[in-house]
Image: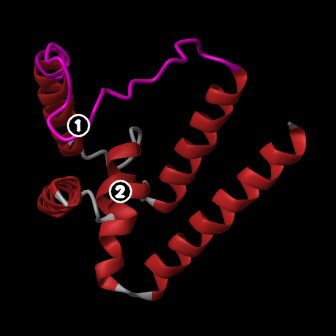
Amino acid sequence: MKQLLAALAAGALFGFGLGLSQMIDPTKVTNFLDLLGSWDPSLAFVMAGGLLVNALLTPLILKQKRPLLAEFFRLPTKAEIDKRLVIGGVVFGVGWGLAGYCPGPMITSLSFADSDILTVVMAFVVGTFAARWVLHRSS
């Protein structure tokens, strides 16, 4: 139960931060990505703030013997950059640039429940299942 409450609190804080920073506004996001047009650099401060908190707290957290609400730390073991990672990053970036949403803000934006966000979420779900299908068939 503690893990679920911690996840709920973290998700609520994350969603609140996305809303407060306007990262759930696709126009704000696409303006941030439009370096040669109506560039809006304000989201760089949001990202820098997240990176700063992560850079400061992650080493302190990993110095602990174990996490507060788990038996052990679950850290990625893969360290190399391969073709699949690069292609996935490019596809993710193109989708983010076209739609103005990445998954966190997209889920937060569901609170608007308009046709635009529902279309983006459906495309996200279809794309996720299509990727799983392709990866399953290729392995």
Q: Which mark is residue 121?
A: none
Vertical order, 36 against 127 (above or below): above
- Going by the picture, which residue comes out furthest to the front? 71
CA distance separating discs 1 and 2: 13 Å
The secondary element bearing badge 1 is classed as: helix
**What's the amino acid at mark 1?**
Met
Residue 69 colored in magenta in the image: yes
Residue 94: give x, y in percent of width and height.
58, 46
Secondary element type, mark 2? helix
Q: Is residue 67 magenta?
A: yes
Mark sitting on residue 104: 2
Judged by its main secondary structure, the magenta piece is loop
The residue lying furthest to the bottom in this view is: 114
Residue 18, percent across and down? 21, 57
Q: Which residue: 53% across, 42% down?
A: 93
Query: Going 22% across and 44% down the picture, which residue do you hit?
Result: 43
Highlighted magenta segment, given as a residue range: 58-82
The image quarter containing residue 53 is: top left
Q: Residues within 10 Å of mark 2 (few under 14, many from 20)?
A: some
Q: Nearer the viewer, residue 79 or 116?
A: 79
Look at mark 1 in the image and give the residue it sits on: 47
